[in-house]
Image (tube, helix red, strand yellow):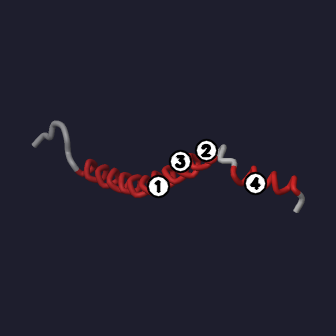
Amino acid sequence: MPLFARSVIKTFWSDERGAVTADFVVLTAAVVGMALLALVPVATGTESMSGKTASYIETVSAGFVSE
């Protein structure tokens, strides 16, 4: 391998600029992924509970009821 190629590869391998950015991107993607995983059960549970609440409210009489 030519000396220039070795120098370029050594410089590239030892350069740590951008490593923090890459870590930040990976960690941000992980946080977003976990938030989405937590959001799905909450969203489906909320939809189910709102449907049950709506059906219950439809059965309850409210206001003035004459006898």
Work out whether 22 lies above or below 1: above
- Residue 21 bears which disc, if any? 2
Residue 43 pos. (x, y %): 41, 52
Q: Mark 1 against mark 2, which lies toward the viewer? A: 2
**Sequence-first disc among 4 and 1:** 4
Local secondary structure at mark 4 = helix
- Residue 28 bears which disc, if any? 3
What amino acid type should be assigned to the residue bearing mark 1? Met
Q: Circle 4 sits on which residue?
A: 10
Q: Residue at x 76, y 54 (%)?
A: 10
The quarter in which the C terminus is drawn is top left
Local secondary structure at mark 1 = helix
Residue 48 pos. (x, y %): 36, 56
Disc 2 and disc 4 in contact, CB within 8 angstroms: no
The Cα atoms of the two marked residues, 4 and 3, are separated by 30 Å
The Cα atoms of the two marked residues, 2 and 3, are separated by 10 Å
What amino acid type should be assigned to the residue bearing mark 3? Thr
Residue 21 vs residue 11: left or right? left
What amino acid type should be assigned to the residue bearing mark 2? Thr
Q: Residue at x 31, y 49 (%)?
A: 54
Callout 4 crowding tier (Cα within 10 Å): few <14, some 14–19, many ≥20: few
Residue 41 pos. (x, y %): 40, 58
**Viewer-proximal residue among 16 and 61:** 16
Residue 40 pos. (x, y %): 44, 56
Q: Circle 1 sits on which residue?
A: 34
